[in-house]
Each structure stands twice: as structure tokens, then as C-alpha cells.
Amino acid sequence: MTAPINRPQEGTLLELRNLRTHFSTARGVVRAVDGVSFTLDRGKSLGIVGESGSGKTILARSIMGLLPKRGTIRHGEVLYAGQDLASLGLKGMRKFWGQEMSMIFQDPMTSLNPLMRIGHQISEPLRVHLDMDKVNARATALKLLQDVGIPEPEKRLDQYPHELSGGMRQRAMIAIALACGPTLLFADEPTTALDVTVQAQILDLIQDQRRDRNMSVILVTHDLGVVAGHTDEIAVMYAGTLAEKASTTELFANRKHPYTEALLRSIPRLDQPSHTRLLAIGGRPPDLITPPTGCRFAPRCPYAEDKCRAEIPELEAASADHSFACWHPVGSPRWQSKQDELVSTGVLSASGGIA
Amino acid sequence: MRYFAQRFLQLVVVFLIVTFVTMVAIQAASKDPARDLAGPLNSTEARVEEIRKHYHLDRAYPIRYAYWLKNLVTVDLGNSPTLGASVRTLVGQRAPITLLLGLYSIVLALAISLPVAVYAAYRRDGPFDRFISGATFAAVSLPNIILAVLLGYFFATRWRIFPYAASKIWPWDNPGEHFKNVALPTVTLAVGLVAIFVRLLRSDLVNTLQSDFIVMARAKGLSPARILWRHALRSSLFSLMTSVALQFGGILGGAVVAEQIFALPGMGLLLFQAVQQKDLLVVQACAALFALAVVIINFAVDMLYAVVDPRIRHARALG
Ligand SMILES: Nc1ncnc2c1ncn2[C@@H]1O[C@H](COP(=O)(O)OP(=O)(O)OP(=O)(O)O)[C@@H](O)[C@H]1O
Ligand code: SF4
Ligand SMILES: [Mg+2]
């Protein structure tokens, strides 16, 4: 009942072609997502990592088509199982939402309806999409609450969000997102509102469910440490564009983009408290109304030179599972000479960490 | 339950204060309350003194008030010298019409405002929303009297759909005639209320529609109708409920005016006559009844908050 029977198990599920999402505001056009392309295979998980304001949420919502029409300018294509989502219209999207793709939001406190019982909130999509009757929907909701590991699930059905702990609320939200057996699950910073101890449990839960249900997952986070153990691939986002995309192992072993390099350097060690922001990188992300003409990272990049400031580096594939957008990637001659300079002036320690 | 009791007690106190203050105000405005109560005509000195003793008008206000309260509780409020009937009968005959008028206008206003506000908020800044914004603005600025005269002219005098000089027919006697008779005064009152309700509800809805849980509801693939009516509306009702409670006194005041214009024999008419004839007991009883109605509505709305929002319910259960 939960999954369409003829769902293919492999192949490309999602393809973005030069997706742009701009907002027209009083100050000017905000280029929140500015030309993002990637593909995601069925059953795979992709982490989208970037600082606050880099456009991760807008990217996820653009793919899903959830942004309000007012003031939003959208270009490019989103192909879902080969179909251009823009051609579906709002009515068509409504059939997709919940059934084909669904989303776990950042803050379960504000994303759950405070005035509606948990059970009702879970059974709602079941009744709307799968035409279940009340009894059936309630039984399924109970089963879902069990699946996501909520203690005393029976009791939770009739409770309101404010009666649950933060972790339970996020589990309830996951149950809602999973209710109709989606093929693609978005999770937008699903753990930032939670205790550190609960965070790992929630991420594991999402991974387990992905495996059980053969879903694809897009996990949005500002914390590289979070995606490290939980996604197959990672896309690093900077100021509305992709800086680098690779399989998780490849990215950690062989990072190419200076921004990724800086991100990795700022991952908190196990023995230190977790950072929520990328403290190790100086400067701030550029203004998205008038971004730098060349490489957007140039103002903060230690390896930047004239070409970087003049010409935009395109995202190019270096190997089958690795692409990056940089004129002087890690390991290049310019990178090497600058690196030596930084070590000799004592900014970096010889091992690569911050001195 | 403790909250319930606490709130109830609060409202009893409010009622006592309001009725005490009105009593003092009404009686202090009179040169000699006893003489007024005796009636303008045929009041001998002896009769005036007898009345003074009977209503304890020679005592201090708090004591007079205590006696009045005792009379109120036993529903024996004395006789009206000018209207020739007991205050209880007079108020009992007239009050229900006014209260019904107030309630009808609120119900009618809500029935119109809810769908209008929901649609305006859904299509925010669209043609309908802009039209409603203009129309409600016009309605707020339109005085009740002018509206009543216009309604009376077209619907009663010209088209004869509704009676102009309405008469009092109880809904349980003849519902059709009853509603025909109260239609115009009800509409007169409702127009201004619709304008206020629509504006309040629309702006709250617009805010609610931006909240995270609405994005979540969309992401679940729910229809706009379901999102609006099941998810957004409920969270947006609080200003509206508060406004109903706050406006209720004003609505009763408006009902008094509307009754005058449409010659509907409700409390308003009674109050007018009583004030003119310095019939202090009737005025006091009317004021007390209005105060009671306002207090009860406020109490009901307060309880309604808890029905709508489980968080309030739970907080109260704890507190
Ligand atoms: N409706 C809007 N109108 C104008 N600008 C917007 C709008 N929504 C988002 N933005 C801008 O788009 C940029 C990207 O926002 P987004 O929410 O996607 O960032 P994010 O990467 O998710 O950050 P965070 O980690 O803080 O959630 C931000 O600079 C934000 O100010
Ligand atoms: S293109 Fe130049 S500025 Fe941009 S990241 Fe690479 S080296 Fe730095
Ligand atoms: Mg975000």
C-alpha cells in the first residue's frame, strides 16, 4: 500500500539543469540559487552543505516547487524521473507532494500544526492521497509512529505537538513525511533544533528508513560533520552556486575546492564542542544581490588572483564522481606556492590545521 | 477547573463594580431620586418620603447598592411609576429582543466574514482582496444611522420586502415573521461588524499563511481549501474572538440605536423612554442586564480560547 509496485529500483531519479531561483525585492534581485546542476540516483543520499544564507533551503524548496509564486523568478529545469516538474502545474505538484517527494523541516516546533493532534497530522496525507478511511489511517499512523521509534506511540496519536519532547516532535515529523511512502525525501537541517544526543539518533533514523524504503534522500545542513557519516554524496554550496560535488569518501580524501578545504578545516574535533557556523573562514559570504563578477569565493579565498575575480569557474567533472568549480584547486601549482607561504608565515601549521 | 473558577470570580467582581458605578452615576445625576421614582405627577410629599424609605434612598450608596443587589437576586426590582408596570415585566419583555439582535448580528457578521476573509487572504493583493479592502474601509466609515435610513428606504419603503415599523414577534411564535422583523436592524448592525471582522481575520490569516506549518501542510500535498479551513483558520481566530468579546458592549449600544430607527420595541426603546422620564429603576436594570450580557460573552469567549488552542487548555489545567 505504501509504495507504488512498479517503482524502478535504479537509475537517475532527479536531474537539475542550471536551476536559478531569484527573488525580486525592493533592494534588487536576490540571486539565492544561481545556476545549480546535478543528478541524484534512486536510493542514494546527497548532502548539501554550506554556510547560513548560501541558498540550501531555497534550493531544496525550489526543487520541490514549494516557494511562493509571488516575487520568485525561477529558471532552469528540474527533471524528476525524466519529467519536467514545471510542466505539472500546481495541481500536478499536489499529487507529487507527500506521495513522491516530501520534506522534513528544520524546526518541528513551528512546522507541526500546534492546534492539531499528532495522529491527525499523520493520517491527513494518508486520507487525502491514499483514500484511507479513518480507522485504517489511524492504524497506519500508529504503525508509522512505531517505525520512527516514538515511545508509547498509541498515546502520542492523541497528543498535541507541545506535549512531545523536541526529539519526539522531529520523529513525528519524519512519520508524516514518510506516511505515503515518498521516493525522494528532503531533510532541511533536521537536527539543528535538537539536543546533540538526539541529533545522531534522528540522522540514523533517516538513514535506516532510506535503506528500508529505497528512498533517495537530500540532506541539507551547514555541518559537514553531519553529512559525513550519513550520505553517499556531498554537494558543497557557496553563495547560491555549487563549489564542489563528490562522493563522500572522495570529498574527504581528495577535496579540490578551497572553500571545501576551509570547511573541512573547520569541522569540530570530537574533543571540542560542535560549531554551528564556519568560524575558521574569515570574512562573510557575498551579497546575493550584487555577487562578485568572477568566482564568488574570491574575496575570501587565499589563492585568488585576477583571473578568479574576472572569470567564473564552471563546475567541471574531474572524474566520474567528482566535480568542482575552481581555477586553482587544491594541489595546483598556485595552491602549492600559496600554501607554502601560509605555512612559512605561520598562519597554517605544517599539518594543515590552523596554527 | 481552578482557572475556570478564578475567571468566573473575576467577572462577578467586574459585574459588581460596573453596576455599582452605574447606580451611583444614575442617582447622582438626579436632583432627588426619590421624587423621580415617585413619578412626575401626583406625588405627594408623603409618597416621596415613603419611596425614599422603601428604596433606602436616604442611606449611603453602598447600602443602597446592597439593597438593590438583594432585589436583583430575588428579581424584584420594583415598579416603574411612569410605564405602569413592574421593572421585571418591562425588562423581561424587551430585553430578549435586544440580546437576540446583538447575537444575530454577530452570527450574520461571522458567517459573512469568515469566507470573505479566507478568500481575500488566500488571494492576497488580488482583485478580490483589493475590492474587499476598499469595501470594508467604506463600511467602517459609514455611520449606522445613515445605513439604517438607506436600508429602510430601499427595503422597507420602496421595495416593501421588510416591514419598516417592526413589531415584536418571538422566534418561537412565528420564526418567519420574527426574522422578517429583525432583518433590517440586524443587517444595520452586521455591516460594520463584517468590516471589522474581515480586516482582523484577513490580516491574521495572512500572517498564519506564512508560518512554517503551512509550508509543511503544502508539502503534504493538501488542497488549498483544506490548508485554509483546517490549518490556517483555526490559528487565526484569536483576534477575532477577542474582538467579538470587546465589541459586544458596543453592539448592544448599536442595537439600541437600530431599534430606535426601525421602531423595534426592544430594550433600546425602553431605555430611551426611561431616561426621558427619569425612571431610574428601569435605567439601572437595563444597565445591569447589559453589563451581565457583556460579562457572560467575555467569559464564553475566554472559555472558547481553550477549546481552540490545546496549549491554553493545558496551561490552564496546570495553573
Ligand atoms: N523570499 C525571499 N526574498 C528575498 N530573499 C530571500 C527570500 N528567501 C530567502 N532569501 C535569501 O536567500 C538566501 C538563501 O537563503 P536560504 O534560506 O536558502 O539559506 P540557507 O542556506 O538555507 O541558510 P540557513 O543555514 O540559515 O538555513 C539568503 O540570503 C536569504 O536572505
Ligand atoms: S577560483 Fe580562484 S578564488 Fe575561486 S576558489 Fe578557486 S582559487 Fe579561490
Ligand atoms: Mg535553511
Image (tube, helix red, strand yellow):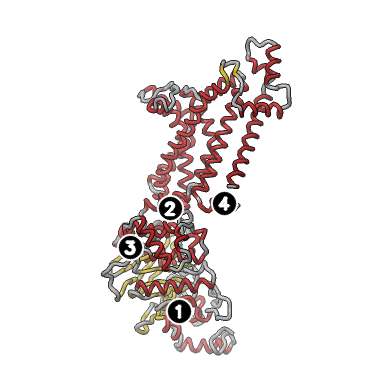
Q: Tell me which amino acid carries mark 4.
A: Ala
Mark 3 → mark 1, Cα distance in angstroms: 29 Å
Label 4 packing within 10 angstroms: few (<14), some (14-19), many (20+):
few
Q: Position of residue A16 (x, y in %)?
A: 34, 71
Amino acid identity at mark 1 = Gly
Q: Amino acid at mark 3?
A: Phe
Q: Chain of mark 1?
A: A
- Whole-angstrom CA distance, mark 1 to mark 4, is 44 Å
Which is closer to the viewer, label 1 or label 4?
4
Q: Which of the pair A117/B147 is nearer the observer?
A: A117
Determine whether the residue tagged by mark 2 lies in a helix, strand or loop.
helix
Query: Which residue matches tag 4?
Result: B317
Q: Are marks 3 and 1 on the same chain?
A: yes
Q: CA distance from mark 4 to mark 3?
A: 41 Å
**Which mark identifies residue A229?**
1
Residue A325 versus residue A95 in the image, above or below: below
Using the image, determine if residue B161 lies above or below residue A177. Answer: above
In the rendered image, which residue does mark 2 sit on?
B231
Chain assignment, label 3: A
Q: State the separation of the CA atoms marked 2 and 3.
A: 20 Å
| Circle 2 Cα neighbour tier, 10 Å, few/some/many (<14 / 14–19 / ≥20) | many
In this view, B298 is above or below B125: above
Is disc 3 on the same chain as disc 4?
A: no
Q: Where on the picture, by quarter, is residue B172? A: top left
Q: How many other residues sit within 10 Å of disc 3, few (<14), some (14-19) or many (≥20)?
A: many
What residue is shown at x 62% (from left), y 22% (from top)?
A: B280
Residue A335 left/right relative to A14: right
Pointer 2 and pointer 1: residues touching (CB < 8 Å)? no
Dot 3 or dot 1, earlier in sequence: 3
- Name the residue carrying label 3: A96
